[in-house]
Amino acid sequence: MDIVLLILAGFIIGTIVISLGGGGAAYYLGILTTIFGLGPASAAATSLVTAFPSLLIGSYSYFRLHKINFKIALRMIYAAVPAVIIGSLISPYIPEKLYSYIIGGILAYLGIQLLLQSKQNNHRAGQAAAIVYGVIGGLMVGVGGLSGGGAITAGLLVMGADMVTAAATSSLVLVTMTFVGICFHLQAGNVDWGVGIWIMIGAILGSFLAPILLNRLDPAKFTKYVKPILGIMLVVMGAFTAFK
């Protein structure tokens, strides 16, 4: 039963979140801590490993559809990778309780960010926004084991990208950040493969479906209805993780 639930959770999150331009690690992290009871460090490492294959497939699919803005993606990657490395190096020295607060706070922040985005109009920002959001996303990966998708996608939307371009471009940035984060987190041996492999299988299946769905659905309507739901889920999971 747990295996079926893990695959189903991975499939749903992989489909929806990649469609919205996120890696899904925040949602995997929330599920791993709240439903399956993994500790913060183990959940952080497992969520990154779980999200990576579906991110890779999703990014390749968007590349074939010619939806990725490589100029902006590279600018964000240059800012994000050093932040991932710094965050990964300091994360083993953070006490477990503080780690729970950090992860819970980031989950809640991302949820609130999604809720606010669903009500705001996007506006153009300078090139510095790509660097700022890249650094934030990188720290989320390195310290919290998150994909950093919320920050990256938000930055792209603020810079004036439409939802399809934001989803596609962020997928490439997240592939790079997640790979670097995995390299550091694997050294600590915190990955729970017994749980992660099944969510990964579901997420891979969902990653094939996401770009196809996004091409057929109305991106504006899809974002309008799904983002608030995901935002509320993240806030609840963040509170539970921080105060359990």
Image (tube, rainbow, N blue to C red):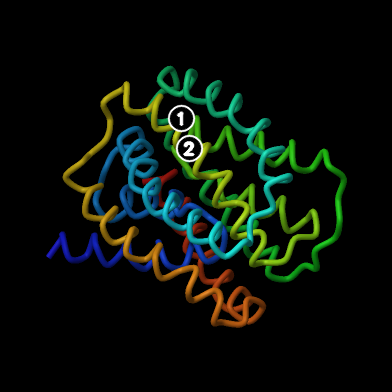
Label 1 belongs to which residue? 98
Q: Are marks 2 and 1 in contact (CB under 8 Å)?
A: yes
Q: Nearer the viewer, residue 75 or 14?
A: 75
Separation of residues labelled 2 and 1 (CA atoms) = 5 Å
Compared to residue 112, the image places residue 105 above or below, namely: above
Q: Position of residue 196 (x, y in %)?
A: 25, 47
- What residue sits 58% from the left and 44% below the top? 173
- What residue sits 49% from the left and 76% below the top? 213
Classify mark 1: helix, strand or loop: helix
Q: Quadrant of residue 115?
A: bottom right
In this picture, residue 155 sits left or right of residue 114: right
In this picture, residue 226 sits left or right of residue 11: right
Q: Nearer the viewer, residue 128 or 94?
A: 128
**Quadrant including the N terminus:** bottom left
Compared to residue 48, the image places residue 230 above or below, namely: below
Name the amino acid, label 1: Leu
Label 2 belongs to which residue? 101
- What residue sits 36% from the left and 49% below the top? 53
Q: Position of residue 36 (x, y in %)?
A: 24, 51
Q: Is residue 239 visible?
A: no
Q: Position of residue 57 (x, y in %)?
A: 42, 55
Q: Is residue 107 visible?
A: yes
